[in-house]
Image (tube, helix red, strand yellow):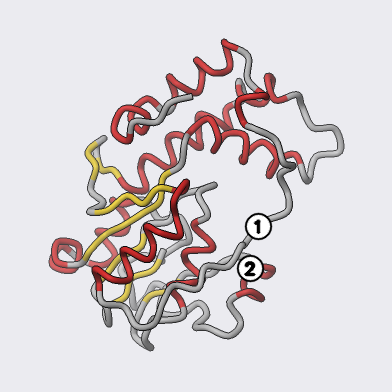
Amino acid sequence: MIVSHEHRFIFLKTRKTAGTSVEIALSGICGPNDIITPITPADEVLRADRRGPQNFASPPLVREATNHSPARKAREIVGEDVWRDYTKFTVERNPWDQVVSSYYWAARTMPEPPSFEVFVRRPRVAKLADTNARIYRIGGRLVADRVLRFESLSDELSSIWTDLGLPGTPDLPHAKSGVRPAVAYQDLYDEEARDIVADLFSAAITDFGYTF
């Protein structure tokens, strides 16, 4: 999560959507009074030449700002006036592809990873759907002003840069890369697994027109 008072925006960071890369890019144009939440030590290395974590603690904030703060909490942290007046944006991704990314990320630390078919049925996937929805929705209602597409992230982030009048151009690093093999996400699914993801992520699929 990043709150830039200098540039009047709030970045709401979803999971498995290149959010860390966006966060690092945005850190480079933040001012000394902006809120920047911590990321992993490995990712902080990528951010070493930009602003690091700052102004996220409580107190003085009413609640501590965290990496994936949900929208309701973010609104409480910044207050109603800032929440209303600042541009709020996030990133969303094709859910079937997102679940495959989550699978390989989880499997990297497992001595004996489950099959993908087993993984899809585990609570972790349902939690991913619920967590990401709450990051940019309140009571099921979309509250982000802009939802960038992971599939065209470089272009969409450039559009944000232009529309908000941000300095320079976005320098988007590739955080958390090199974990997933070069595989088409469709190849991992059977029909039942495809339908499970369709049900869990139905709001994102409907709102953003994603297809398998």
Q: Quadrant of the N terminus?
A: bottom left
Q: CA distance from mark 2 to mark 1?
A: 8 Å
Q: Nearer the viewer, residue 123 or 10?
A: 10
Q: Residue at x 63, y 20 (%)?
A: 189
Q: Is residue 49 left or right of residue 13?
A: right
**Image position, residue 208 (x, y; %):** 32, 35
Name of the residue lying farthest toward the right: 111
Residue 150 position in % (x across, y down): 46, 48
Disc 1 residue type?
A: Lys
Q: Amino acid at mark 2?
A: Asp
For label 2, the residue is: 43
Q: Position of residue 81 (x, y in %)?
A: 13, 67
Q: Residues within 10 Å of mark 1 (few under 14, many from 20)?
A: some
In the displayed structure, 65 sits above or below 206; it is below
Q: Is residue 5 above or below residue 208?
A: below
Depth check, front residue: 180 or 60? 180
Residue drawn at x 47%, y 69% is 37
The answer to which quarter of the image holds residue 161 is bottom left
Q: Is residue 206 left or right of residue 27?
A: left
Q: Nearer the viewer, residue 170 or 45?
A: 170
The image quadrant that residue 6 belongs to is: bottom left
Residue 55 image label: none
| Helix, strand or loop at mark 2 | helix
Residue at screen point 50% across, 15% down: 195
Which callout, 2 or 1, points at the residue further toward the start of the chain?
A: 2
As drawn, the residue found furthest toward the top would be 192
Q: Are marks 2 and 1 in contact (CB under 8 Å)?
A: yes
Q: Is residue 47 left or right of residue 3?
A: right
Residue 212 placement, left or right of 192: left
Q: Residue 102: where, in percent of width, then height?
A: 62, 40
Q: Secondary structure at mark 1?
A: loop
Disc 1: which residue: 176
